[in-house]
Amino acid sequence: MLIKTDDLGVPRFSNRDLTDMIYSGHVDKCHVVLCDPSDDIDKFNAAMQDQHLPELTKYIALDVDQKTFDGALQSEWFMPDEYKTLNVHNYVLTKCNTQEETARCAEELAEFEGRGMKPLLQYMIYLVDFMRENDIVWGVGRGSSVASYVLYLIGVHKIDSIKYELDWREFLR
């Protein structure tokens, strides 16, 4: 299925798309949906209730610019609730094997937290899990993000920044 989006990048589905999601077994891959007013999201959600499957949340399009929209979404992050409550510190620190790795992660995590980026890390964990579960290939690493050991442990990239002595501050400057 080719996903259509509105001007803000929000997925937009037709009745046919919603039906296809049911029959192809991919209804669990979408949590929020933007529909035309004429579409039958209520019928779709009734079918989901009958099958004991998660319902879609109807997203009402906003008349805002891209920057305002992105700012609002950063507080919502379209991801399952289990990731919104995930303790990122525990998730990352349990992957550390040495004192050096633990110290590096603690320092990076403090900076991420200080910048209000905890939801971003939760979303990155969700995104990596989603890509792994669905056999989606992503790059080895690119740009300054490879300097972050936290992102390496999450699986965003495959560059061990401790091994290559990369300064994590390069990523968060």
Image: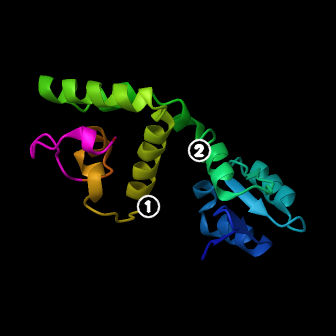
Name the residue located 9 percent from the left edge and 46 percent from the top edge.
164
**The residue positioned farthest toward the front in the image shown:** 173
Q: Which residue is mark 1?
A: 134
Residue 98 in view of the camera: no
Label ID, residue 22: none
Viewer-side residue, 16 vs 107: 107
How dense is the environment of label 1, judged by Cα within 10 Å: few (below 14), some, or many (20 and up)? Answer: few
State the image coordinates of residue 48 (x, y, percent, origin top left). 75, 53
Which region of the structure is painted magenta?
A: 158-172
In this picture, residue 163 sits left or right of residue 30: left
| Residue appearing at x 79%, y 64% in the figure | 35
Amino acid bearing label 2: Trp
Q: Quadrant of the N terminus?
A: bottom right
**Residue 82 occupies quadrant:** top right
Measure the alpha-carbon separation of dots 1 and 2.
20 Å
Q: Identify the secondary structure beneath mark 2.
A: loop
